[in-house]
Amino acid sequence: MGEKISQSNDGYPINIKQINGNFTDIHPAFNAQKVISESSRCLFCYDAPCVQACPTAIDIPKFIHQIRTENINGSAKTILSSNIMGGSCARVCPTEILCEAACVRIKSGEKAVEIGQLQRYSIDKFMMNCNEHPFIRAKPTGKIIAVIGAGPAGLSCAYKTAELGHDIVIFEAEKKSGGLNEYGLAAYKMVNDYAQKEIDFLLQIGGIKIEHGKEFGKDITISQLQNKFDAIFIAAGLGNINALHLDGENKIGIEDAISFIKNIRQTNDKQNLDVGDDIIVIGGGNTAIDAAVQAKRLGANNVTLVYRRGAEQMGATIWEQDLAKTNGINIVQWAKPTAIIRNEDDKIKAMTFEKTILIDGKLIATGKFFNLTTDHILKAIGQTLELDLFEGLELSGNKIKVNSNYQTSIKDVFAGGDCIDNGEDLTVQAVADGNKAAIAINDFLKSKK
Ligand code: SF4
């Protein structure tokens, strides 16, 4: 890595005020006037396609109508009854490919109703004024459930099962709960410690205990938990960072984008993060964009994102790709890294890439190489399951195999989130998994009785 950041592109020093300004809320909240005009654009469709496009099936026309008629508490309850993490989803959901992409307004050539912003307004207003939790917990069932992981899937499952009267213990390896929302998203997507505020709100339902610093596989195992708990829900995420398999990959100057993002999220002193001057980010997903844009906003002079395929194959949404471009990120497609070049002091000075091409659906290396100067490389090439931790569970494509009820090959063990086959690293999808698994676990416990 290079010297501590001190200059912007135009050569002027970057100060803490500028850096903090670069990390303010990327989607500033709507004011009341904008909420009135936007909510009046909703056509309150019957069989609304936006609802079908929402993984948590929030009744969108209903909550927008409640906002429109100034029933903010009612609208928040409508949202939270389907998605207890509706506040964070309103901030971080890629609405442009989910609910808003399905809005009928688009068919008539107009902009979609800004569902995410209306949802945020409702939840924020409700949480600001609410004195008590909006839902009542059912009578205690005497059953106790272990949840592994306090990310969105684990928290939503814990919440829903607690609401149904069960007691829950969540085991979390990190110091804080929240998973992706707390550690894995660009800081400008969720500001003012919102992830923790939402968790505090969620826990008010009662019956949920969280044990931090408990690492699955080291401090707890499935068989230990089976002795004490009536059911287990695994929402442990993916712990293994994929490798580039290049010489010198594990030496200084290369880090995984997840750790880079986590450091930015957890520091109180962004100005002193040693980001470097010429950054290369390898990858094409939202994590790659989050890392690249944040590196630029921290003051790196040049940030280049390199992806081995084209724009259409990138996991990052078009909105994210545009965000990268408007933040001055140089995007290089159809190239894969082949070597890390270091100087005599072992410091990174460049990376070699080979151009790629797609022939009959196969990615082919062309034999044409080029170098890019760099002092800091960030890997955002995905994560995989720590397979040895899940011995005894049937797997599918290196992830945990579950049936349509989120039940694994062990009948009292359920799983959800990105550790299951077809799981995604998307907050709203994780919440949907947690909700559905909670219902299935409840049915399973009832059937045991
Ligand atoms: Fe409203 Fe659009 Fe949903 Fe129809 S599809 S209910 S107009 S948000």
Image: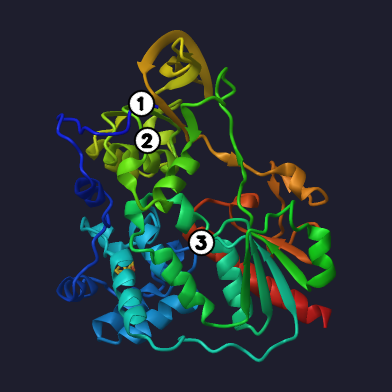
Residue at position x 44%, y 64% in the image: 54
- The residue where tag 2 is placed is 274
202 left or right of 447? Answer: left
The quadrant the C terminus occupies is bottom right
Provide residue 332's location: percent of width, then percent of height. Answer: 35, 25
Residue farthest along the bottom direction in this orientation: 139
Task: Say which of marks 1 and 3 sits in front.
Answer: 1
Q: Pointer 2 and pointer 1: residues touching (CB < 8 Å)? A: yes
Residue at position x 21%, y 32% in the image: 7
The quadrant the N terminus occupies is top left
Between the residue at mark 2 and the residue at mark 1, the CA separation in whole angstroms equals 7 Å
| Ligand 1 lies under 8 Å from the Cβ of mark 3 | no
- The residue where tag 3 is placed is 178
Q: Earlier in the sequence, mark 3 or mark 2?
A: 3
Between the residue at mark 1 and the residue at mark 3, the CA separation in whole angstroms equals 32 Å
Q: Earlier in the sequence, mark 1 or mark 3?
A: 1
Q: Residues within 10 Å of mark 2 (few under 14, many from 20)?
A: some
Q: Is residue 47 above or below residue 253?
A: below
Who is closer to the viewer here, 379 or 64? 379
Quarter of the figure with residue 314: top left
Q: Secondary structure at mark 2?
A: loop
Residue at position x 82%, y 62% in the image: 224
Q: Residues within 10 Å of mark 3 (few under 14, many from 20)?
A: many
326 left or right of 319? Answer: left
Q: Pointer 1 and pointer 3: residues touching (CB < 8 Å)? A: no
Who is closer to the viewer here, 63 or 123? 123
Quarter of the figure with residue 98: bottom left
* Marker disc for residue 2: 1
Q: Secondary structure at mark 1?
A: loop
